[in-house]
Image (tube, rainbow, N blue to C red):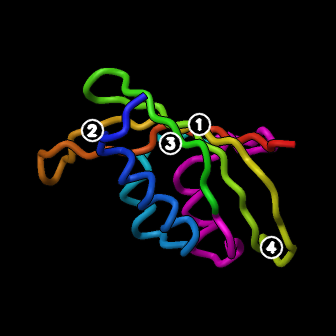
Amino acid sequence: MTTDHPVLALEDRLAAAMKASDAATLDGLLAEGLVFIDQNGRSQGKTEDLAIHRSGLLRLDRLEIADRQLRALGADAAVVTLRVRLEGRFRGAHVAGHFAYTRVWQQMIDQKTGEGVWQVVAAHCSTVA
């Protein structure tokens, strides 16, 4: 387990962007080819994820992170696992629950700058009873 990896700060930015529905920040943190499997087993990509945040269909009032762990996979990949307590509204209905997330981050070369940028390439969410 790593405690000083650059992805940990990006995880903090990701959580803040999710809570604020900051689609611009999320756009930079999520890879174009993102595959996200939600707690209902549905697969969605970056476009669908950003659309939910841009539309206002999702509003998070609470996003509390616990038990976050990172495992580096060489120099350009990392897996993060965490538990999250979420509360808010989705499509006007109250939603709340505890969830387990797994995210795979990969360092990619930015085509504009030529620099390495870390992005989420895959993620999975499960409901925790």
Q: Position of residue 87 (x, y in %)?
A: 75, 68
Which picture quadrant has residue 82?
Answer: top right
Mark 2 to mark 3: distance in Å? 13 Å
Q: Secondary structure at mark 2?
A: strand
Earlier-in-chain disc, 3 versus 4: 3
Q: Which residue corresponds to mark 3?
A: 34
Earlier-in-chain disc, 2 versus 4: 4
Q: Secondary structure at mark 4?
A: loop
Q: Are marks 3 and 1 in contact (CB under 8 Å)?
A: no
Q: Given the image, on which type of amino acid does mark 3 rest? A: Leu
Point out the stretch of residues depicted in magenta: 37-63
Earlier-in-chain disc, 2 versus 3: 3
Q: Secondary structure at mark 3?
A: strand
Q: Which residue corresponds to mark 1?
A: 102
For the N terminus, the image quarter is: top left
Q: Secondary structure at mark 1?
A: strand
Q: Nearer the viewer, mark 3 or mark 1?
A: 1
57 relative position to 15: left or right: right
Earlier-in-chain disc, 1 versus 4: 4
99 relative position to 68: left or right: right
Mark 1 to mark 4: distance in Å? 25 Å
